[in-house]
Amino acid sequence: MKMFTTQDGKNLFVTFALVTTLFLLWGFCNGMIDILNKHFQNTLHINKFQSGFVQFANYLGYFLMAIPAGLLAKRFGYKGGIIIGLVLIAAGAFWFIPATKIGTYWAFLTGLFILATGMTCLETIANPYATVLGPPESGATRINMAQTFNGLGWILGPIVGGYFVFGKTGGEGAAAATAAVETASNAGLYIPYMGVGIVVTILIIVFAMANIPDLHNEEEVKAEATGKAVKPLWTRQHFTLGVLAQFLYVAAQTGIFSFFINYLVENVQGMTDMKAKDWLGVGGFGLFMAGRFCGSFVVGLMKPQKALTIYAVICFVLSLLAMAGLGMVGVVALFGTFFFMSIMFPTIFALSIRGLGEHTKLGSSLLVMSIVGGAICPPLMGWIADISSMKVGFAIPTVCFIFIAIYGLLWKKLESKDAGEGGSDEPVSVRPVH
């Protein structure tokens, strides 16, 4: 339990366990989004480029809400920000009930946008909060542990959502697609989101009653006490390049997740949407969760930046194999990216906010804002797939992994330079501030 004990001896394991439910929640919501691409292609007769706007609506919410979420966290504290985020998620989830009655693409996208604004609040708060719930040197390990539950949510999302969505439409064939259009307002789509709304309502009550301490890192506390200025964010290269790395990582991850079903249907003989959905949920996201679990130990055994570099290089090679196709070789390579992508988001996040002091909440907001990379990649990959093939579309994540590897390789040099110009290359400590 030392991993969850602060310098003043307070054990924060219970708080950490409660916060991990948020990681599970937004993982589940994001997992359901990844089956909607193919669902809307079938039911609304749209192409891959158009279906990519499912992710665009989702990540646009992240982009627009990130800064406000940071300001809300600063104004109302971690607990208040979490509750606001949960309220927005509940509103977006319950919106799917009238959205299925309306039955138009924009109605569904509106619900996803509202959901995304709530998830933005949670990610802006929960990611940095997980890093300070114990000794600073184990911050990267804690966030990877929490993100393991996020991986579990990614597994459950397409399984549960796919049961109601593809299970109702049949998931394939012209007849099934025509029937789906006629029943666009049926319970198949709103039931899982209604369930999310009910669970989130319960979580709102739990968090309202729970004791969630507002933790500040020691550098931030000292700055507030002395009035000493901290080096501006935009001059810290380990942070600014970290934002770019996070942008490219989310672009790669979202592109792979979004078109995994399309890739399998095009490259595996006899593959159907329903089967591919199960492969995505159990196989793909199962590996993603396993990677997060193993990654918690990997970043504890070696320097996080070194692990990031190695994993990014492996993903680059696997993406090249996926582009080449080669039957099941390409499919296996694509599955491999799920495992090795897993540590990237939390590790980049932890490395980027290192030593930001009073700018930690703003830095967190900008890192969450960089998730907008997920809005850009799917439409671009879909456009490439429409004019060429799905395999060629995977060139986009391949390029992204190159930069991430370079960032991991250069991080120590960048962070040391930033520390020498006003920061600190020592792990920052935390203490509760009430």
Image (cartoon, grey):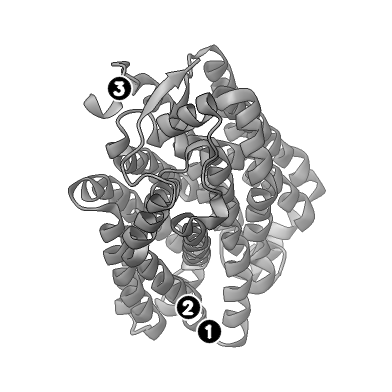
Residue 266: mark in rendering: 2
For disc 2, the neighbor class at 10 Å (few under 14, some 14 to 19, many from 20) is: some
Alpha carbons under labels 1 and 2: distance apart = 9 Å
Q: CA distance from mark 1 to mark 3?
A: 55 Å
The residue that appears at 56% across and 61% down in the rendered structure is: 171
The amino acid type found where label 1 is placed reads Ser
What amino acid is at disc 2?
A: Glu
Res 7 label: 3
Residue 191 higher or lower than 251, as above or below: above
Where does residue 164 sit, x and y in percent of width and height?
56, 46
Question: Residue at 58% of width from left, 34% of height from top?
Answer: 196
Q: Nearer the viewer, residue 404 or 27?
A: 404
Q: Secondary structure at mark 2?
A: helix
Residue to which mark 1 is pinned: 389
Q: Is residue 32 visible?
A: no
Q: Residues within 10 Å of mark 3 (few under 14, many from 20)?
A: few
Residue 98 in the figure: left or right of residue 377: right
Secondary structure beneath label 3? loop
N-terminal-most mark, 1 or 3: 3
Of the two numbered discs 2 and 3 on the same chain, state the one appearing first in sequence: 3
Q: Is residue 172 visible?
A: yes
Amino acid marked by disc 3: Gln
